[in-house]
Image (cartoon, rainbow, N blue to C red):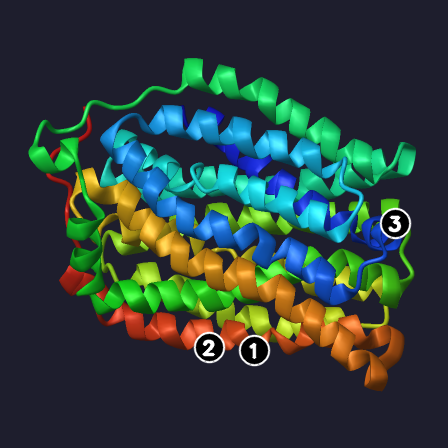
Amino acid sequence: MLGFLLIAYIFNFLDRQILGILAGPIIADLKLTDAQFGAIGGIAFAILYSFLGIPLAMLADRTSRSRVIAGSLAVWSAFTALCGSATSFIQLFIFRLGVGVGEAGGVAPAYALIADYFPPQRRARALAIFSLGIPLGLALGTLIGAYLAAWVNWRAAFIVMGAAGVLLAPIMLWVVRDVPRPKTPSAAAPRLSETFPLIARKPAFWLMAAAASCSSLAGYGLALWTPSVLERSFGFSLIERGQFLASIFLIGGTAGVFLGGVLADKLGAGDKRWYAWLPAVAWLVTAPLFALGLLSENATAAWLLLLIPNALNILWLGPVTTAVQHLVPQQLRSTASASFLLINNFIGLGVGPTLIGWLSDNYKVRFGDEALRYASVSVIGFYVLAALLMFLASRRITQTWVEDEAAPA
């Protein structure tokens, strides 16, 4: 079950990151400004992705989490393939809206399904394994997208990746099964009217959501635009950009995500505040290293400096997603996760890529060809803000923690 959910999550981020590595040829072919491309990678994806997450999570809580996940995979993959047919800014914007519609139903139900399968003492590690889909998807999307675009064109990259996801969807539906849930009225029909007021009264929720949003604003923005920084400031070819970033995502990202889950399970068993302390410390180290890496004039030094923050900036996934699961009773977890993801993704995905693109266009008068590099550095301060918010959340986690009602079947 966990393995197939991981594969689906890899496709989730593969279909996101492929846009970033193909920025150069897409901008040139469709004659886009950086602000327009930032809107396609940011707000176009985030609008429906964020707000449809809650109704789809409620549907998953009421019906079948596994069916919602498989159906979502088919939808976002189909729209990814359609991106390869876009001939204008408007068309690509609309198709990215469709990708967001599909991906809205893929994450929150998966979080809840994993929480159903794994006991609390192993839950952060299980969620961290699932979250490996982020660095693996980023790495594969970067590498495969670069090679397909170099061998054929950028349109072929979208079509191939989208078609593969559509073929995977029915296999997901066959393999992944729901765990029987408690037969209570709230389990049968959880409502947003009962879930959101419950979590809204908990300051830990708002602080964790705000912290994760600040981190994601910087993280999603840098993920989309770093390939273009490598092209414009370092002179990398498409294949060189793919190899450079794929190696960083694969080595740093996978190590950081898994380490976060293991440490959270071990340290959090003794003190729940570690679920917040771990990401806070990681973000404080991330900020200066990202800045040094992006401002470096040497490609080798840049690779070494960017490797560590690409591990630490997503270390939060296992600890924080586990903590969110424990803000509400078991039967309300999909909806609670979707409420958290709405805030995180609307701010992180919607604002981050769009802000960097807008800053790049406005910095060109002062910085010329280096405008995008300095626009990217400008958002790194959000990691420091994220750390401060998470330290504040650590003071609230223990008093709001909800233990499992019973061990999973």
Question: Residue 32: x percent and y percent?
Answer: 80, 59
Number of other residues with Cα within 10 Å of mark 3, as a class: few under 14, some 14 to 19, many 20 or more: few
Q: CA distance from mark 1 to mark 3?
A: 33 Å
Amino acid found under the numbered disc labelled 2: Leu
Q: Nearer the viewer, residue 52 or 337?
A: 52
Proximity of marks 1 and 3: CB atoms separated by less than 8 Å = no
Query: Foreground residue, 268 or 364?
Result: 364
Figure disc tally:
3
Q: Judge the density around disc 1: few (<14), some (14-19), many (≥20) Cα neighbours within 10 Å.
A: some
Residue where numbered disc 1 is placed: 381
The residue at the point 64 percent across, 39 percent down is 15
Q: Which is more N-terminal, label 3 or label 2?
A: 3
Question: What amino acid does circle 1 point to?
Answer: Gly
Q: Quadrant of the N terminus?
A: top left
Badge number at residue 385: 2
Callout 1–callout 2 Cβ contact below 8 Å: yes
* Residue that carries the numbered disc 3 in the rendered image: 29
Residue 268: x and y in percent read 28, 55
Label number found at residue 119: none
Label 2 residue SS:
helix
